[in-house]
Amino acid sequence: MKLNIGVIKGDGIGPEIVTEAMKVLDRTGEVYGHEMHYTQLLMGGASIDVHGVPLTDETVQLARSSDAVLMGSIGGDAKTSPWYQLEPSRRPEAGLLRIRKELNLFANLRPAVLYEELKGACPLKEEITQGGFDMMIMRELTGGLYFGARATEEKDGVLTAWDTLTYNEQEIRRIAKRGFDIAMKRRKKVTSVDKANVLDSSRLWRKVVEEVAADYPEVILEHMLVDNCAMQLVKDPKQFDVILTENMFGDILSDEASMVTGSIGMLASASLNESRFGLYEPSGGSAPDIAGKGIANPIATILSAAMMLRFSFDLDREADAIEQAVAQVLKEGYRTIDIMSEGKTQIGTAKMGDLICGYIR
Ligand code: NAD
Ligand code: IPM
Ligand code: MN
């Protein structure tokens, strides 16, 4: 099979972690007889440096004509990077938000799995993590606060800034359906997370999610307020199967969930639309504090590449092979610094990629 993959290396650690994911894809192609065809695309700060804007129309077109896009991460240090002297609509993050919207990538899947081998890197007590956990955060990605009207205004010498959180029924229904479909293939439980005790948008969210749930009688639905969910994630993460939530809540809860798996460097993600197209990227950022040092954890990006093979190409065997290779390397005790614990062997980004390649079979 020939796979046409758009590649956005991005900023900070982006190029380092994407290089390792491409290495693993190439190795998988070699073993299973697929041809990887990459088109390099610029987005974020790297695009600002060349074109003056974080995303060009041409890049959107090239992404659209690929089968899937693999991405690192974009952005820089807001204090020191010149990108943050630009107006907000021209900063790196605006490119990411625009590509999500233009390609209608409304469903963001972030699987938070505690590998048995990584218990030592998890900050929670052993009695809580006993038996591990495996949850899927389904984050709505093209609505809510991120895409509502916003402005900063001055009146009588006082500055006021506002953002709006808007959802319509269709936006809620399509992400809820995706969440229930995924729950049907898992442990058949959906925890819908909102702030329905305060927000109208959350009350609509709850109503529509309940309507959708009626079509999935086998799935257990529970509603949870977002503040409680943040607490439950560290008190008892095992209770969760699918967490279904709006854009901003999902952003925050997924970073929290990543840490209980050991590190943000472990959290893969897939951003999907109604077709088979997807943008696959680690959930974490460009990590300016460690960029260029060769120590970033490439596993989230490598696992995102596995999600790409599974969701955009139906290559389940190949995706399984990558996931098993990651588990094997962790089992042998190899760790990047972010997941390091006593008695393990610390290695860098490239070595981690090489070791994972060695177990693809
Ligand atoms: P961050 O996720 O980049 O970093 C937070 C912490 O996690 C840092 O200490 C970093 O070193 C660590 N970390 C992140 N990924 C790691 C990895 N793979 N291996 C080891 N350690 C890792 O978050 P931030 O510092 O708040 O944001 C930095 C920049 O990244 C900002 O410009 C932000 O907008 C951007 N960002 C981009 C994306 C994306 O492209 N999808 C996601 C989040 C943040
Ligand atoms: C993420 C990031 C982005 C978001 C930023 C960079 C705009 O934090 O993908 O989680 O908030 O969605
Ligand atoms: Mn985030």
Image (cartoon, rainbow, N blue to C red):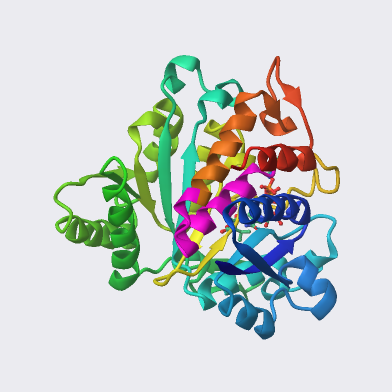
Q: Which residues are magenta?
A: 298-317
**Magenta region, mostly helix, strand or loop?**
helix
Q: Is residue 129 above or below residue 291?
A: above
On the picture, is 334 further left or further right than 280? Answer: right
Instruction: Name which residue lies at 54% across and 70% down.
Output: 100
Whole-percent x and y of residue 343? 71, 15
Whole-percent x and y of residue 215? 16, 59
- The quadrant of the picture showing ligand 2 is bottom right
Residue 192 magenta-drawn?
no
Instruction: Name which residue lies at 26% across and 49% down.
Output: 184
Q: Quadrant of the N terminus?
A: bottom right
Front position in the image: 248 or 279: 279
Q: How many marks?
A: 0
Whole-percent x and y of residue 189? 27, 42
- Specify the quadrant of the image occupied by residue 165: bottom left
Instruction: Name which residue lies at 48% across and 36% down.
Output: 113
Q: Quadrant of the C terminus?
A: top right
